[in-house]
Image: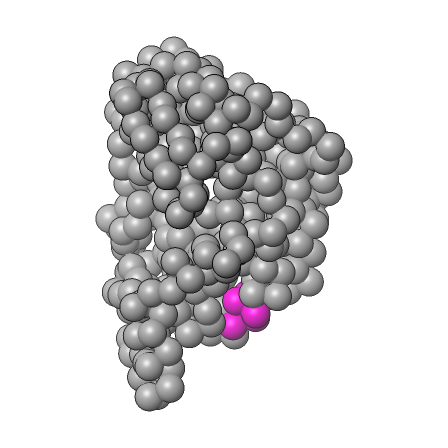
C-alpha cells in the first residue's frame, strides 16, 4: 500500500458513512428545508490539489480543484456566500443576514491557492479570503510543519529515536503519518520546548539534513496583487507562523504588525483581519488580543470549531470549520446544512 492509499484508508470514517446514509435516505432534502440560524459559517481550506503533489504534510490538502469547484457550485446555489467586509460588519453587529451565510477562507498562502482556488472562485464570482504568512511570500522554503513531515517521510531508518524533549521511539515501518502527527502535536503544544533544538533533533534522528528547494511553494508578490485586484480578500496569518501564545507580548505585536504592514504595502489595501496560526484555543491569549487591538485589526479567526451566532461573536475569536480532502460530497453537504441550522456541523 502506498502513502496516498494508506492515508485514504485512515481517513475513512463513521461520519462519511452516516452522511452517505442521510443522502441516500432523503434526509438531506429534509435538512435543507429546516429553518436556518442567523449565523456566519466559516469554512477553512489550506492546500488545493493532490497529496501526491507535496513533499511535506499531506494533512494540509483540503480539496482537489474538482472538489472545490463542486463545493462552491453547491454552496452558491443554496446559501449567501459572504464577503470579508460583510463578515466583519456582521461580527460587529452592524449588519444582519437573512439566515446563515458562508465565508470561504484559506490559510498559509501556498501557490496552489493562486493556481487552483483563485480561478475557481473568480469564475463563480465568489470572494475567498486568503490569510498570508508574509515571511513565506514567494518562498521555496519548507515551513516547520512541512519540514517535519518531509524528514519523517524521507528518514534513512525505519526506527526513529528522539532524545529531546524526552526520549521517544517511533516505528516508521508501519505508520509514518501517525509519527508526523505526533511530532506536530509536540511542536504545537510545547510552550517550554526549544523549537529549533527539536527540529535539529528530528533531523539528526532521521538523517535528513537538506530540504528540496527546486520549486516555489508560496504565492509571490505579483500573484498576491492580482488576487487582491480581482476581488479576493487578503488577511494576515502573521509574519513567520509562530504559535502566538508561545511568544512574549512584544514579539506577538511584532508578528502581527509586520505582517499587516507588508500586506498593506503589497496589496495597497487596508488589512483588518488575521487568522491565528494553528488556531487552537490555546494558540492565542489575552496578550494576543491586546496586540491585535494595538496593531489595528478588527477581526481574528480561530480554528477549533464552534458557533458564530448573531450578537454573540467575540471579534477576536471567530470560529472556523475544517474542510478535508476525501470526505466526499455527502459529508460536505451534511456539515454545511447542519451548520446553517445549528450554527456548527453535526458530523
- Hey, which quadrant is residue 259 in on the image? top right
Quadrant, the C terminus:
bottom left
* Residue 2 percent coordinates (x, y): 53, 55
* Residue 137 percent coordinates (x, y): 64, 30
* Coloration of the structure image: one colour
331 in the magenta segment: no
> What segment is highlighted magenta in the picture?
70-74
* Residue 40 percent coordinates (x, y): 37, 56
71 in the magenta segment: yes
Can residue 299 be seen at all in this image of the molecule? no
Q: Please report the residue visible at 64 percent of the width from the left and 36 percent of the height from the top.
A: 218
Q: Please report the residue visible at 69 percent of the width from the left and 62 percent of the height from the top.
A: 123
Can residue 217 be seen at all in this image of the molecule? yes
Q: Nearer the viewer, residue 289 or 242?
A: 242
Main secondary-structure element of the magenta-colored stretch? helix
Is residue 250 toward the left or the right of residue 54 in the image? left
* Residue 338 percent coordinates (x, y): 31, 68
* 71 to 235, vertically: above or below: below
Q: Please report the residue visible at 55 percent of the width from the left and 35 percent of the height from the top.
A: 154
Q: Nearer the viewer, residue 127 or 336?
A: 336
Q: Please report the residue visible at 36 percent of the width from the left and 70 percent of the height from the top.
A: 16
Q: Nearer the viewer, residue 261 or 107?
A: 107
Amino acid at each position: 500500500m502506498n502513502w496516498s492509499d494508506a492515508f485514504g484508508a485512515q481517513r475513512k470514517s463513521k461520519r462519511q458513512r452516516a452522511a452517505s446514509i442521510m443522502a441516500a435516505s432523503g434526509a438531506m432534502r429534509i435538512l435543507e428545508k429546516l429553518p436556518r440560524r442567523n449565523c456566519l459559517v466559516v469554512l477553512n481550506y489550506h492546500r488545493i490539489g493532490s497529496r501526491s503533489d507535496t513533499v511535506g504534510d499531506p494533512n494540509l490538502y483540503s480539496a482537489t480543484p474538482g472538489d472545490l469547484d463542486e463545493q462552491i457550485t453547491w454552496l452558491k446555489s443554496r446559501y449567501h456566500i459572504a464577503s470579508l467586509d460583510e463578515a466583519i460588519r456582521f461580527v460587529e453587529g452592524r449588519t444582519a443576514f437573512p439566515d446563515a451565510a458562508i465565508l470561504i477562507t484559506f490559510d498559509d498562502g501556498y501557490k496552489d491557492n493562486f493556481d487552483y482556488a483563485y480561478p475557481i472562485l473568480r469564475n463563480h464570482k465568489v470572494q475567498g479570503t486568503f490569510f498570508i504568512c508574509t515571511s513565506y511570500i514567494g518562498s521555496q522554503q519548507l515551513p516547520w510543519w512541512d519540514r517535519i513531515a518531509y524528514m519523517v517521510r524521507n528518514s534513512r531508518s525505519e526506527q526513529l529515536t528522539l532524545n529531546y524533549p524526552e526520549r521517544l521511539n517511533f516505528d516508521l515501518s508501519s505508520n509514518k503519518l501517525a509519527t508526523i502527527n505526533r511530532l506536530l502535536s509536540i511542536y504545537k503544544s510545547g510552550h517550554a520546548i526549544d523549537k529549533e533544538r527539536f527540529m535539529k533533533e528530528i533531523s539528526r534522528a532521521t538523517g535528513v539534513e537538506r530540504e528540496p528547494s527546486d520549486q516555489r511553494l508560496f504565492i509571490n508578490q505579483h500573484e498576491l496583487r492580482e488576487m487582491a485586484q480581482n476581488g479576493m480578500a487578503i488577511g494576515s496569518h502573521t509574519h513567520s507562523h509562530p504559535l502566538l501564545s508561545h511568544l512574549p507580548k512584544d514579539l506577538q505585536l511584532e508578528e502581527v504588525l509586520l505582517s499587516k504592514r507588508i500586506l498593506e504595502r503589497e496589496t495597497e489595501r487596508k488589512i483588518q483581519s488575521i487568522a491565528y496560526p494553528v488556531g487552537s484555543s490555546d494558540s492565542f491569549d489575552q496578550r494576543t488580543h491586546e496586540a491585535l487591538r494595538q496593531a489595528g485589526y478588527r477581526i481574528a479567526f480561530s480554528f477549533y470549531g464552534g458557533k458564530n451566532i448573531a450578537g454573540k461573536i467575540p471579534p477576536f475569536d471567530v470560529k472556523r470549520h475544517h474542510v478535508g480532502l476525501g470526505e466526499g460530497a455527502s459529508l460536505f453537504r451534511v456539515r454545511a446544512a447542519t451548520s446553517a441550522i445549528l450554527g456548527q456541523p453535526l458530523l
